């Protein structure tokens, strides 16, 4: 990786660094930079620090157990960390949960984002001139804010917002707040909107780990509707590399759409995983025998696809990981880490009716 922060004085604050993508970012920064890392996280059901704990440089890792919604707690954390750079990833992130109970999404994703924007702005205004000039706030968002595509077309930086789930509406609101803090206060924001991520350490409720785990347990593999919903998949490290590039070279006020150019229907993803498992852990009959179609998710967006031409041209980003190879790698990781799966699942009380988990 060529994007590294070699300044030992640099202090980087990452919100949501105990989550799937944040954990990958924190580990990468610990392994490849010399900066001091402040990992601010509420440590919800979705958190897990085993990825971060694999780093050999934990001396530079400072965990701050803070809820973004708690303004006073957050204020203390900002004073303590005194950051030069903030990556804001913390969010409630699971669409199904947002349909069942939207309140935590409104609180964490909207109020939480307002709190960190406001406090980070005050912190930035009080920095020395040099530090103020170099300060950046990377607001990490999703392609889901753009709504649903038909069979044609792609999302890009100019696409109008049209969120349809409580999750995507809360993320869209947070994006609007970030834009407002840039335009109103000149606060140095760079915004990113990325497509669906996958990779090791992803929480077992999300599509790819859910399928792997169901198949390994010889349980029904549920697919929403007709399985024809299309997502654009990207390996998590490619997303993290794009975030680091945005922080290093991104233009203040710009947004960057990040995608893998890997459009797959949900059914294709499930079949692909079953075929990998058929090779790695063959059973008498293919894992595909476990596939069942279940009632569709309400407001289920039909298709997402990102045109990432802008970040490719402006920042020279491109995905380094081939889709099939990294899916293979991900399945392999879940096969080798059954203890991790059991441990994380034992902490969760959500029964996930919507996921077909009870069916
Ligand atoms: N996973 C994807 O495919 C994807 C794609 C594009 C963008 N994103 C965005 O990237 C970010 C990270 O996604 P993820 O998949 O790693 O999510 P995740 O659910 O795995 O992790 C989110 C982390 O945020 C923390 N958090 C939640 N509410 C908090 C609060 N109020 N205060 C402090 N911490 C809180 C959680 O404890 C958790 O550790 C999110 O903002 C998400 O919208 C995700």
Image: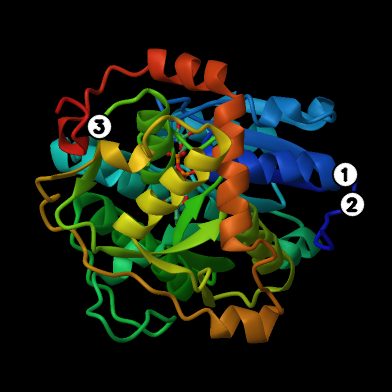
Q: CA distance from mark 1 to mark 3?
A: 46 Å
Q: Mark 3: is the Cβ under 8 angstroms from ligand 1?
A: no
Q: Which quadrant holds residue 51?
A: top right
> How far from the left and from the top, in percent, is residue 333?
61, 34
Q: CA distance from mark 3 to mark 2?
A: 51 Å
Q: Along the line of sight, which residue is nearer the eye, 36 or 265?
A: 265
Mark 1 or 3, closer to the camera: 3
Mark 3 or 2, closer to the camera: 3
Residue 134 vs 343, above or below: the answer is: below
> How far from the left and from the top, in percent, is residue 287?
37, 38
Q: Is residue 276 visible?
A: yes
Crowding at dot 2, Cα within 10 Å, few <14 / some 14-19 / many 20+, comes out as few
Residue ID at (16%, 37%): 354
SS of the residue at dot 2? loop
Does 225 sit left or right of 275 as displayed?
left
Q: On residue 34, which mark appears?
A: 1
Q: Which quadrant holds residue 323?
A: bottom right
Which is nearer the N-term, disc 3 or disc 2?
A: 2
Judging by the rendered image, the residue that carries numbered circle 3 is: 220
Q: CA distance from mark 1 to mark 2?
A: 6 Å
- Do the residues under discs 1 and 2 have CB atoms within 8 angstroms? yes
Does 277 sit left or right of 84 as displayed?
left
Residue 52 vs 190, above or below: the answer is: above
Crowding at dot 3, Cα within 10 Å, few <14 / some 14-19 / many 20+, comes out as many
- Do the residues under discs 3 and 2 have CB atoms within 8 angstroms? no
- Quarter of the image for the C terminus: give it: top left
SS of the residue at dot 3? loop
Judging by the rendered image, the residue that carries numbered circle 2 is: 7
């Amino acid at each position: 990786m060529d994007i590294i922060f070699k300044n030992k004085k640099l202090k980087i604050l990452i919100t949501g660094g105990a989550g799937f993508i944040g954990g990958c970012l924190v580990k990468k920064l610990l392994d490849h930079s010399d900066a001091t890392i402040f990992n601010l996280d509420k440590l919800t059901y979705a958190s897990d620090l085993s990825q971060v704990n694999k780093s050999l440089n934990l001396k530079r890792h400072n965990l701050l157990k803070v809820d973004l919604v708690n303004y006073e707690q957050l204020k203390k954390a900002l004073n303590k960390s005194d950051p030069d750079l903030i990556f804001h990833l913390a969010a409630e992130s699971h669409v199904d949960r947002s349909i069942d109970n939207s309140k935590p999404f409104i609180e964490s994703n909207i109020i939480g984002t307002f709190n960190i924007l406001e406090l980070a702005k005050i912190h930035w205004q009080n920095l020395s001139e040099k530090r103020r000039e170099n300060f950046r706030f990377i607001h990490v968002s999703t392609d889901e804010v753009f709504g649903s595509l038909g069979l044609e077309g792609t999302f890009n930086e100019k696409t109008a917002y049209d969120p349809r789930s409580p999750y995507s509406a809360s993320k869209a609101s947070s994006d609007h707040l970030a834009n407002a803090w840039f335009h109103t206060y000149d606060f140095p924001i760079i915004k990113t909107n990325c497509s669906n991520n996958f990779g090791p350490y992803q929480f077992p409720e999300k599509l790819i780990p859910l399928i792997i785990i169901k198949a390994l347990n010889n349980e029904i593999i549920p697919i929403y509707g007709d399985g024809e919903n299309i997502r654009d998949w990207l390996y998590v490290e490619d997303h993290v590399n794009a975030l680091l590039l945005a922080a290093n070279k991104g233009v203040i006020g710009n947004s960057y759409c990040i995608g893998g150019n890997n459009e797959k229907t949900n059914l294709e993803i499930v079949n692909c995983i079953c075929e990998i498992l058929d090779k790695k852990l063959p059973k008498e009959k293919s894992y595909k025998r476990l596939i069942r179609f279940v009632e569709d998710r309400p407001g289920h967006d039909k298709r997402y696809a990102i045109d990432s031409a802008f970040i490719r041209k402006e920042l020279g980003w491109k995905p380094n990981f081939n889709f099939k190879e990294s899916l293979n790698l991900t399945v392999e990781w879940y096969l080798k880490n059954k203890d991790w799966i059991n441990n994380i699942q034992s902490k969760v009380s959500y029964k996930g009716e919507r996921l077909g988990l009870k069916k």
